[in-house]
Amino acid sequence: MQYFVRGLFLGGASTGLLLMLPAVLLQTAVPLPALSAALALATAVFLAVEVGLLPFRMPQNARLVPSDIVVRTDGSGALQFGFEMGTGLRTFVPSHLPYAAIAVLLFAGPWWATPLGGLAFAFGRSLMVRSAVRSGDASAWDRAFAARRAPILALCWTVAVLAGGLAVALQHGGWTLF
């Protein structure tokens, strides 16, 4: 488990670092009102897809763990899979919230916070995995999560939209969060 979690954080940090350049370019070249409009539009699209108003899903690499990674005994398989999962480039993305978080990092967050966003993504994924493993019965944990998925997502989206709106309002008012 420790190699997997390390891989998650390495992958998340890598993705965050890669987002830094487009964030810098966008935030220096595009006026603040256009950035705010892009963030609002992106968030609306991701939320509409989430609730089924738009009939498509964002791209994801929806593959399960390959068996050649699982059987490695030196920890490299777990590290590799954790890295890939931490980047968001491997396995299922169960919500469109990570895409909205990327939009916040690109359009409204300070450019230097992008690696922190990547680490936050990895932290969220590690919490899910750790809680499923610690439950003792991952299948029962999956069923319980599936039964509560809608209210959990509603709460997460509400917090995300309110926080994003507050950040944009503060930014337009001349305030910065960082």
Image (cartoon, rainbow, N blue to C red):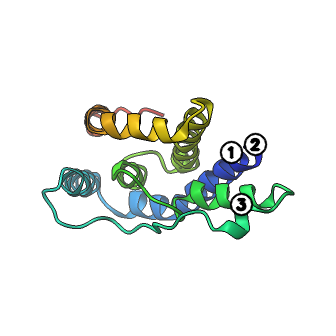
Q: Do the residues labelled 3 and 1 touch (CB within 8 Å)?
A: no
Q: Crowdedness of circle 1 by 10 Å Cα count: few (<14), some, many (20+)?
A: many
**Residue labelled with disc 3:** 70
Element type where label 1 sits in the image: helix
Element type where label 2 sits in the image: helix
**Residue labelled with disc 1:** 5
Q: x%, y% of residue 140? A: 47, 36
Asked if residue 167 shows in the view, the reply is: no
Instruction: Work out how far the residue at label 1 is from the one at label 2, CA to CA, in angstroms.
Output: 5 Å
Q: Is residue 3 left or right of residue 53?
A: right
Sequence-wise, which precedes: disc 3 or disc 1?
A: 1
User: In the displayed image of the protein, which residue is found farthest to the left?
Assistant: 53
Q: Crowdedness of circle 2 by 10 Å Cα count: few (<14), some, many (20+)?
A: few
Instruction: Work out how far the residue at label 3 is from the one at label 1, CA to CA, in angstroms.
Output: 14 Å
Q: Crowdedness of circle 3 by 10 Å Cα count: few (<14), some, many (20+)?
A: some
Q: Do the residues labelled 1 and 2 touch (CB within 8 Å)?
A: yes
Comparing 161 with 156, the one in front is: 156
Question: Which residue is painted at 72% across and 69% down in the image?
Answer: 68
